[in-house]
Image: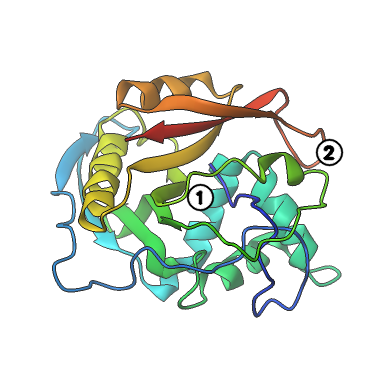
Amino acid sequence: MWERACSGRRSDEDGVSVDIKIACHTAFVGTPPGASPLPQDVRVTDIYGEIMAVEFRLAVRADAREIARLFQITSEGTADYIWSQLAQPGQDLLDVGAIRYARDNVDFSWQNCLIAESDDQVIGMMHSYVMRHDPLATPVTDPVLAPYATMEIPDTLYISSLALHEGWRNQGLGKQFLDYAYDRANQLGLNGLSLIDYAANAGARRFYERHGFRIVDTCQITPHPMIRVRGEAYLMYRP
């Protein structure tokens, strides 16, 4: 999953007019009254065979750089492509992503992120926000992002990234993230969860299908040197 394209939302304080998903709505900010309970702490085995405690918490602004780094893992180059449209000459793309996620009260913010950490180190995160229909949307013209313009389901909680560092996968943490997202969507009165995945990422697709997601739309990925996958992208939905 990744920072997604949509139907040409208006530019925000970045001051650019590239066709990317621009923040218009916020799924959750801080810890609102009656917020969904965080997943329970768990114990898992790390890459060295040691039993480690994992705890979940809402992100803080200081997590912005690690959030951006995890977006790079799951986006197969799409996050870097988007950030390259925002970068100043010579600016490191991870720095651009960190600045982007350090913002407040926008969709792509630390405020919409749930963190998993172990031994005070971030090991994974889920970023999600409410997907709304924008009647003022304008057509997307960027050839890389345009195929995704209609790949959205309004009034769902859109999971833009669910990422775990290598060594922490396949231990039930992804299910913990999804359970939290589903509870949050129900609490907000939304019509389920949505996300975009790549056909090339068969393992992730099987994971989501095991947890109630189904493919409801597809698009063809536009080849680009920064994009690491080819073929189709899937819009997946869990009611």
Please name whichever residue, 39 or 236, is drawn nearer the observer in this view of the structure: 236
Instruction: Point out residue 78 in the picture as x, y percentages from the top left corner.
Output: 68, 46
State the CA–CA distance, disc 1 to disc 2.
Answer: 20 Å
Q: Spot the residue most to the front.
A: 135
Q: Earlier in the sequence, mark 1 or mark 2?
A: 1
Instruction: Give the residue drawn at x 47%, y 32%.
Output: 236
Instruction: Give the residue drawn at x 77%, y 68%.
Output: 87
Left or right of residue 37, residue 195 in this image = right
Q: Spot the residue most to the right.
A: 89
Q: Which mark is residue 225?
A: 2
Instruction: Give the residue drawn at x 65%, y 80%.
Output: 13
Q: Which mark is residue 231?
A: none
Please name whichever residue, 126 or 129, is drawn nearer the observer in this view of the structure: 129
* Quadrant of residue 56 within the rendered picture: bottom left
Please name whichever residue, 13 or 126, is drawn nearer the observer in this view of the structure: 13
Secondary structure of residue under mark 1: helix
Give the residue type that dot 2 points to.
Pro
Q: How many marks?
A: 2
Left or right of residue 82, residue 155 in this image = left
Give the residue type that dot 1 points to.
Leu
* Quadrant of residue 34 within the rendered picture: bottom left
Instruction: Point out residue 76 in the picture as x, y percentages from the top left corner.
Output: 64, 38
Instruction: Point out residue 71 in the picture as x, y percentages from the top left corner.
Output: 54, 50
Secondary structure of residue under mark 2: loop
> Crowdedness of circle 1 by 10 Å Cα count: few (<14), some, many (20+)?
many
Residue 235 visible from this viewpoint: yes
Instruction: Give the residue drawn at x 77%, y 63%.
Output: 18
Q: Which mark is residue 70?
A: 1
Instruction: Point out residue 210 in the picture as x, y percentages from the top left corner.
Output: 32, 21
